[in-house]
Image (spheres, rainbow, N blue to C red):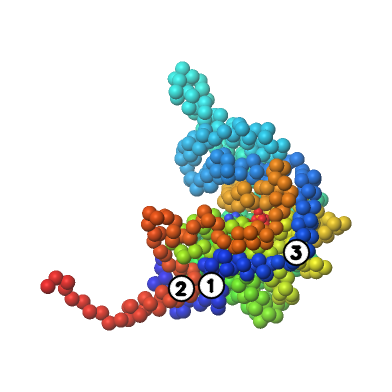
Amino acid sequence: MNFMNQPAANPPSIEGLNDLYLADEQTLVRELIAAADPGDAARKKIGETAAQLVSAVRRNRVQEGGMEAFLQQYDLSSEEGVLLMCIAEALLRIPDADTADRLIADKVTSARWKDHIGVSDSLFVNASTWGLMLTGQLLSLDEAAVRNPVQALGKLASRAGEPVVRTAMRQAMRIMGHQFVMGRTIDEALARAGKKGNRDYRYSYDMLGEAALTGADAERYFGAYRDAITRIGKAAAGADIFASPSISVKLSALHPRYSFTQYDRVMRELVPRVAELAAHARESGIAMTIDAEESERLEISLQVFEGVYRDNALRDYEGLGLAVQTYQRRARSVLSFLTGLADDVGRRIPVRLVKGAYWDTEIKHAQELGLESYPVFTRKAHTDVSYLACARQALAAGSAIYPQFATHNAHTLASVLHYAGSRQDYEFQRLHGMGEELYAEVTDRDKFARPCRVYAPVGSHEDLLPYLVRRLLENGANTSFVNRIVDESIDVRDIVADPIAVSGEKDGLPHPAIVPPAELFGSERRNSAGINLPDGAVTAGLLSAMRAAIDAPRTAYPIVG
Ligand code: FAD
């Protein structure tokens, strides 16, 4: 931590934004329920529409199943699901082949991949399972050979098989890659988007890869984004900015020290970089959306966004937007801030409303820090209600916000359709490889006729792994909509349960199993309390107390008489 060396004179905090950082969940949820509730009659209609959508999805489900089938097959309640995630994530971080082989030996043999063969109708799931089982069997053979030296042949085969194991794992990843990634290069992705069946969708391209760790990484990502913008712009061929294809950008990829405690440096170095990309997107006639990342980056992300948005070179550009996560307790304050900003500048802001992809990390991080509470909700239904309240707020912002609703949940989607009524100035969004059947209904000109944009990751299968792990974590959970919709044993009525009613039944109380971070160790001991440095108000208080302590006159004397 370097903030003493690089102090911001007064780390700015966006007025009022952090009041709800760790707000009391029950009080907040009660308010959100009131804000989201469209009345009994409307809720009944929404439930009916959602049920129709779910039935249609189940009826039309393509047998190849895709990501949903895979996620259901390897959900995180199965040992194999967890193992798959561990291996995928760990393989990415292992630079040498030997260690990779040892990890595979340790993990793959312990799973029962065979149980999954033939369970799913999905070709995709079976292909992946075969790849995994193949490797599992090779290693089992190795173990057997070690126990019985007579089986020398088997031992030899297993030795020869170690690199094969790695190859097979990577092959399985490649199969998944094709499913989840639009193309290995932007040209490949653009070509795929132009194919029949895909042409009905709008696209937002995401250059896969995670946070930049060095200046060189950031340079590389910047180049990749700039190049992608040029190519997407050519494909856009002058379409309306809201209808044209767009690019999604991660700020963490563009600066190696992108954090609130590096405020001065981030504003000095990152704002011009993002502004340059935005100006290029403007010239290329496409929109640019800034992805939402961890909650500790929310405040700085808004400051960077404001810095870029107010740039004079972008004054007529309505394509610069950002994602807002509704699992964060501050979600509605973020929307108020953006509405105020758009009103002040007089230009519309496209806002992609998402629930949020880092829930597990957020919970763990708050526990590590020993915070007073969590920055996110502890019940899924609370996040859903927050989404509905935010959807209404975004629509009510009128010409300040162009709402983009990113969800695969039929109830959330049906609610938005109802709230929006006859309005046409909004779109839905889904992830590539997910929600195809649901959106086939929604985009159908004879049914709902609403536009949908596909978030389309671009990159090689090595870059895919962290993305896949996030999708697995998020959607592998048994509360996840995509996980439940493909499970025929769950009744349609349960799948489209109204989150307003579900949250109301528990009166907005937090989940009892997710105790406040301070109480993590129960009666054993109190968790050590941390300081929430990304909260500008907290940091400002801390810095002024430190300055006062430094400035206070000091007296030194021996403590031994
Ligand atoms: P649902 O199954 O209805 O919701 C699942 C979500 O509920 C989880 O992701 C989590 O947010 C929440 N949840 C689950 N369990 C709990 C719990 N116990 N307590 C509280 N909340 C819980 N995510 C980002 O973070 N940043 C982005 O920039 C981003 N961009 C996206 C772009 C597009 C086009 C799409 C479709 C998604 C994007 N996402 C992004 C991912 C998005 O956050 C998830 O896809 C979304 O949360 C899944 O919501 P759902 O409505 O489809 O599914």
> In the image, residue 32 lies at what x, y percent?
64, 67
Q: Identify the secondary structure beneath mark 1.
A: helix
Q: Residues within 10 Å of mark 3 (few under 14, many from 20)?
A: few
Count of numbered labels shown in the rendering = 3
Q: Give the labeled residue for mark 2.
A: 538
First reached walking from the N terminus: tag 1 or tag 2: 1
Q: Which quarter of the figure has residue 205?
A: bottom right
Name which residue lies at 69% across and 71% down: 393
> In the image, residue 70 lies at what x, y percent?
66, 43
Q: Identify the secondary structure beneath mark 3.
A: helix
Q: Residue furthest right?
A: 446
Dot 1 amino acid type: Asn
Q: Residue 216: which numbered mark, if any?
A: none
Q: Give the labeled residue for mark 1.
A: 18
First reached walking from the N terminus: tag 2 or tag 3: 3
Dot 3 amino acid type: Asp
Q: Give the labeled residue for mark 3.
A: 40
